[in-house]
Amino acid sequence: MEVLHPTLINIGGRIYRKNTIRETTFQNEEEEDDFYREPMQCLDEPCDDFTVEESERGFKCTVDLPSQLFKYIIGKKGETKRNLESDTRTSISIPRPGLEGEIVITGQHRNGVISARTRIELLAETFRKKQPFTHFLSFPLNQPEIQERFLQFKEEVLTKCSKDHGIDNTIFQNPAKLHLTIGTIVLLSEKEVKQAFELLDKCKEDFLGKLAAGKPLQVKVAGIEYMNDDPAMVDVLYAKVQMKDGSERLQLVADRLMQRFIGSGLMLKEWDRVKLHATVMNTLFRKDPLAEERNSISSGKPGQRERESFDARNVLKIFDNYYFGDFDLNTVHLSQRFSVDDSGYYASSGQVTIS
């Protein structure tokens, strides 16, 4: 470990220093009912920023984790759990598969209980990062005018550029799901979903209205851009979104939301700033109509599907400054991945107004 620049991990708003560990990977581990990892080296000193109860029998504390993460704490054939108990001289009780509940740690020594809890939280955080995201913060762009102009764009592209390699009807976004993604989140229980919405509501209270000057953000959707290096081999084409008055307020709102969720530990940091873009064409849609913006958002799974790119040179030349419309943006959604509501947009686990 680099002494002057150690690896830091944010767990529940607390910052931990993590020693270098060696991770053992097992063949076909994603198909196993449980997982094993060699015992994780914990912190140099314990952090007791949680409640440890004392009784005549010793010490006890609990860890509240979603049940999906229990298998990582148990390990293959229970080996990870046994190693944790042996290393920390504690007893760890984990709810049965399929049941929600708290992990209970008991032991004769307070530091051992604290160390066991810290190691469990580090294990959970390590494997949480490997889970595909379940929710994302979004700005809906599915206003009627935007949808109408998008469908016109689609029709004209198919008419004027249909002979260009890889361009067909299947790679266009669903107009009802046009949006800007602020950031992705892994929420593994109803309690975590509630926690995320409460944080979003707190963002409204703390800064949304102030940054937006107390009124909806007047935005313009115009112009197109691509994400690949070669315009002849494009996977994602997106519409550019900006404030009509040329200010940075939309960017500031998106960045502050991202920073607040990263600071809470609910969102992983991927970029220093939110890239404001509205996907209009994506080659992932070619075989998977429900696919989302996986080109710019890690799903946490290795081996992304192979995709057939398209030649966007004529599209960029003809539609470079295409105008999709103006509208007042006034809501932020905690959207559920792979879902739909009555309007055709992503189902919401909560939303707040900006103004």
Image (cartoon, rainbow, N blue to C red):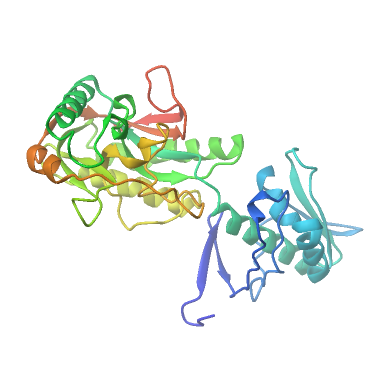
Asked whether, in this view, residue 128 is left or right of residue 52, the answer is left
Task: Tell me where residue 81 sits by quadrant.
Answer: bottom right
Task: Tell me where residue 193 sits by quadrant.
Answer: top right
Asked whether, in this view, residue 12 is left or right of residue 276, the answer is right
Q: Nearer the viewer, residue 182 or 12?
A: 182
In the figure, 27 relative to 22: above or below?
above
Q: Residue furthest bottom?
A: 3
On the image, the x and y values in percent for residue 229 come to 22, 57
Asked whether, in this view, residue 259 is left or right of residue 190, the answer is left
Q: Nearer the viewer, residue 226 or 99?
A: 226
| Residue 204 visible in the shown view | no
On the image, the x and y values in percent for residue 129 come to 54, 54
At horizontal 32% and vertical 31% (from top left) the residue drawn is: 170
Q: Residue furthest top?
A: 342
In the figure, 271 relative to 109: above or below?
above
At horizontal 57% and vertical 40% (from top left) the residue drawn is: 192
At horizontal 8% and vertical 43% (from top left) the residue drawn is: 317
In the figure, 287 relative to 34: above or below?
above
On the image, the x and y values in percent for residue 348 come to 45, 28
Asked whether, in this view, residue 302 is left or right of residue 232, the answer is right
| Residue 262 visible in the shown view | yes
Q: Quadrant of the N terminus?
A: bottom right
On the image, the x and y values in percent for residue 201 come to 43, 35
At horizontal 66% and vertical 74% (from top left) the residue drawn is: 45
Q: Quadrant of the C terminus?
A: top left
Q: Residue furthest right?
A: 56
In the figure, 183 relative to 329: above or below?
below
Instruction: Tell how many labels.
Output: 0
Q: Nearer the viewer, residue 290 or 190?
A: 290
